[in-house]
Amino acid sequence: MPAVLRQEEFSGLGFGVDERDARHELRRQISHLERELASLFGDAFGHTEIPHRVQSLISAPRVLDLGELEAVRDSLAQRIGEARSALSDRSVLETRNRELLREMLDRPEEFKWLRISRADVGEPGCGAWHSRPLLGPLGMLMGWWRVKVSSGCPLAGRLAAVEHQAEAREAGFRT
């Protein structure tokens, strides 16, 4: 198709080809595809990684011809297909994990030592649900299992104290 639209091939026929409408339509399509890819990237941010970059055809700035514009459009369309597939796969996985979490909350003794994080079910932040025995080894022997919900992310002050202790050890001081 790009060979049909090349202007040089029509020079012997005595009339010129106006590519403005074709360029305008291709740029409109590329713009639409870029917005859609940006939207998919925003939806996936923090949940899964999607292919969102399109490599440039040439590093020097110039006006692309129709064939190159079509290549950019096709590359964007391919990336959007891959992004939709990745988002769909992640959505299916999160749905299965939510169902597993519901079952684990209902019957913790059937899901011994299973841990499901908030990221696994598509929720932001730290934290997890963990099926464990109620009273340690005694609860394990008696079959008393429960789901413990972690409180979330560690406190920043605690992390700073640990870093301070590590720096002190490196410097050769005892803490």
Image (tube, rainbow, N blue to C red):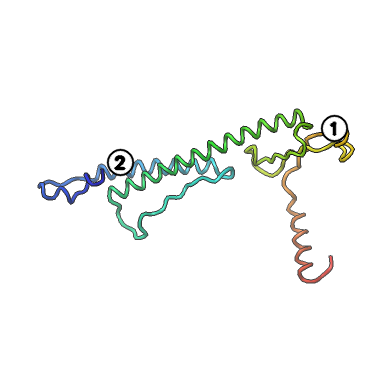
Q: Amino acid at mark 1?
A: Gly
Question: Who's the residue at 67% across and 40% down the image?
Answer: 118
Side of 79 relative to 124 (left or right): left
Q: Amino acid at mark 2?
A: Glu
Secondary structure category for the residue under label 2: helix
The residue singled out by tag 2 in the image is 25
Question: Who's the residue at 36% across and 44% down the image?
Answer: 73
- Can you say whether 19 is above or below 99 in the image? below
The image quarter in which residue 29 lies: top left
- Can you say whether 101 is above or below 14 in the image? above
Question: Who's the residue at 80% across and 38% down the image?
Answer: 132
The image quarter in which residue 70 lies: top left
- Can you say whether 3 is above or below 93 in the image? below
Circles 2 and 1: CB atoms closer than 8 Å:
no
Q: Nearer the viewer, residue 150 or 138?
A: 138
Q: Position of residue 65 (x, y in %)?
A: 28, 51
Q: CA distance from mark 2 to mark 1?
A: 68 Å
Image quarter in which the C terminus is found: bottom right
Q: Which mark is residue 143?
A: 1
Q: Position of residue 1 (x, y in %)?
A: 26, 43
Secondary structure category for the residue under label 1: loop
